[in-house]
Image (cartoon, rainbow, N blue to C red):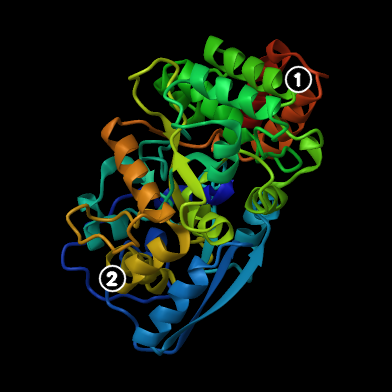
């Protein structure tokens, strides 16, 4: 899902042969129509020619439109065409779009899958060196790396994040007051007590859905707390021997199913998608909603300032460290792009230009990332966006960020997580069968890459 669901979600690629690193000292201007993976060069000088960049992005996330407009304002010779589709469609069609003769210059790609091996994405190592992205937090770029063995978290850089997300729980303050909740839960036990309070007061405890798999925010938040996050990260990064079939996954799946059985989730949970979930919560339907910072501005607009709180999933035991899903809203430059250098210039501008960084925060509520020594954008005091930025800092301090399990392989979200969790929530699959089914699909998907 994008982190924006999306978070869930995302993708990217380049010629495997392009893994070679290039010495870029000096960065002599090169052709903007040549892949750095093919030419061995990358230019940091913006073209003076008239160029139109084509961006393939997700529906419902207007940040690229705002950024493109500002970039064109500053550099009138560069214009943009932005094509949008649902996250699910992009996930399914991304490789085909990148392989086409009319490949975009930039594409939202939540998970790399086999795109590196298939030569569909551009190796960004030359730009990493040329633009000095080594000043960025290493952890910020980790999920965008993949080595020659297909293991993520290491190796060359293939993706670039536009805003860095953090996930948590939104709480409707009016409903919290109604059911007698006076503080944010500090443990999962306290959270479950609040769920029961809501149920007893005839208030829907959790607004979520599984039609498109958005409820994975809830299940992964539980799994994150029940075990060693490093084991889960190893699995998401496809490290040899890693498995999803762990006691933490089993406990998380069991609790998630238990919440559905107790009536904490909507009765039609399998018919609710991401858009409906947010619309329902914004309309006052549900005490809690697991979601990301990208909806902070939307929730505040719908419920009013002070009408909602945003907090981190509590740990299992009081005082435990926070763990939360969060990653860059990753994009990739297809190998077939005709404007590699100009597109890379645009990406670097997003991370370094003061106005661009402010747009990222204003539109997405996400941290702009980049060099941590750079000035942070301004935010409204007491806003949910300010809260989200503070939560992101808290998770960073606890070294608690994880990727989204939906990004583990190219097919696992739609091929296993979404359908099997529908079965789990309707009691047609046991938690034991669920964890084994996810691992079996994972192995099959990896073998097919």
Expressed as whole percent of the image width and height from the top left, the position of residue 147 reads: 40, 37
In this view, the residue in front, 359 or 27, is 359
Expressed as whole percent of the image width and height from the top left, the position of residue 68 reads: 46, 76
Which residue has dot 1 on it?
261
Left or right, 176 with respect to 403, comes to right
Expressed as whole percent of the image width and height from the top left, the position of residue 115 reads: 55, 47
Q: Residue at x 61, y 13 (%)?
A: 250
Q: Secondary structure at mark 2?
A: loop
In the displayed structure, would residue 346 be above or below residue 170? below
Q: How many residues crowd mark 1 within 10 Å: few (<14), some (14–19), many (20+)?
A: some
The number of numbered badges drawn on the structure is 2
Q: How many residues crowd mark 2 within 10 Å: few (<14), some (14–19), many (20+)?
A: some
Which residue has dot 2 on it?
353
Q: Residue at x 60, y 67 (%)?
A: 103
* Residue 369, quarter of picture: bottom left
In the displayed structure, would residue 180 be above or below residue 384? above
In this view, the residue in front, 264 or 399, is 264
Front disc: 1 or 2: 1
Q: Secondary structure at mark 1?
A: helix
Distance CA(mark 1)–CA(mark 2): 49 Å
Expressed as whole percent of the image width and height from the top left, the position of residue 310 reads: 46, 43
In this view, the residue in front, 126 or 418, is 418
Q: Residue at x 40, y 48 (%)?
A: 388
In the displayed structure, would residue 122 be above or below residue 408? below
Name the quadrant of the N terminus. Answer: top right
Which numbered tag is attached to residue 216?
Answer: none
Left or right, 408 with respect to 101, comes to left
Q: Earlier in the sequence, mark 1 or mark 2?
A: 1
Q: Residue at x 60, y 40 (%)?
A: 175
In the displayed structure, would residue 108 be above or below residue 34? above
């Amino acid at each position: 899902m994008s982190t924006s669901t999306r978070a869930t979600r995302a993708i990217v690629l380049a010629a495997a042969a392009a893994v070679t690193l290039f010495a870029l000292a000096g960065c002599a201007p090169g052709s903007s129509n040549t892949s750095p993976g093919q030419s061995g060069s990358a230019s940091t000088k913006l073209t003076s020619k008239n160029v139109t960049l084509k961006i393939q992005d997700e529906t419902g996330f207007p940040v690229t439109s705002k950024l493109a407009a500002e970039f064109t304002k500053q550099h009138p010779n560069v214009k943009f065409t932005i094509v949008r589709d649902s996250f699910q469609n992009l996930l399914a069609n991304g490789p085909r779009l990148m392989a086409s003769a009319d490949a975009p210059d930039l594409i939202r790609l939540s998970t790399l899958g086999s795109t590196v091996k298939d030569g569909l994405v551009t190796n960004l190592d030359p730009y990493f060196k040329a633009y000095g992205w080594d000043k960025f937090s290493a952890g910020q770029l980790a999920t965008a790396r993949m080595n020659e063995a297909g293991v993520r978290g290491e190796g060359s850089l293939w993706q670039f994040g536009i805003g860095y997300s953090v996930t948590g729980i939104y709480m409707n303050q009016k409903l919290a007051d109604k059911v007698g909740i006076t503080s944010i839960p500090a443990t999962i036990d306290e959270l479950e007590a609040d769920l029961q309070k809501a149920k007893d007061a005839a208030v829907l405890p959790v607004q979520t859905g599984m039609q498109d798999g958005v409820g994975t925010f809830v299940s992964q938040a539980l799994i994150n707390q029940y075990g060693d996050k490093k084991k889960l990260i190893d699995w998401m990064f496809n490290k040899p021997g890693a498995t999803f079939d762990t006691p933490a996954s089993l406990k998380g799946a069991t609790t998630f199913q238990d919440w559905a059985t107790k009536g904490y989730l909507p009765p039609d949970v399998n018919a609710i998608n991401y858009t409906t979930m947010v619309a329902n919560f914004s309309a006052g339907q549900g005490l809690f909603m697991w979601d990301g910072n990208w909806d902070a501005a939307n929730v505040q607009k719908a419920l009013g300032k002070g009408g909602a709180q945003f907090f981190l999933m509590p740990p299992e035991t009081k005082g435990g460290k926070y763990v939360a899903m969060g990653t860059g809203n990753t994009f990739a430059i297809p190998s077939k792009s005709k404007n590699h250098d100009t597109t890379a210039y645009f990406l670097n501008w997003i991370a370094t230009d003061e106005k661009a960084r402010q747009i990222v925060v204003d539109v997405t509520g996400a941290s702009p990332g980049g060099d941590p020594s750079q000035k942070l954008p301004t935010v409204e005091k007491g806003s949910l966006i300010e809260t989200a930025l503070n939560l992101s800092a808290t998770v960073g301090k606890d070294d608690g960020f994880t990727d989204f399990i939906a990004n583990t392989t190219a097919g696992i979200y739609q091929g296993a997580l979404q359908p099997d969790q529908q079965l789990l929530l309707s009691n047609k699959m046991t938690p034991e069968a669920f964890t084994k089914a996810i691992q079996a699909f994972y192995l099959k998907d990896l073998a097919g890459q």
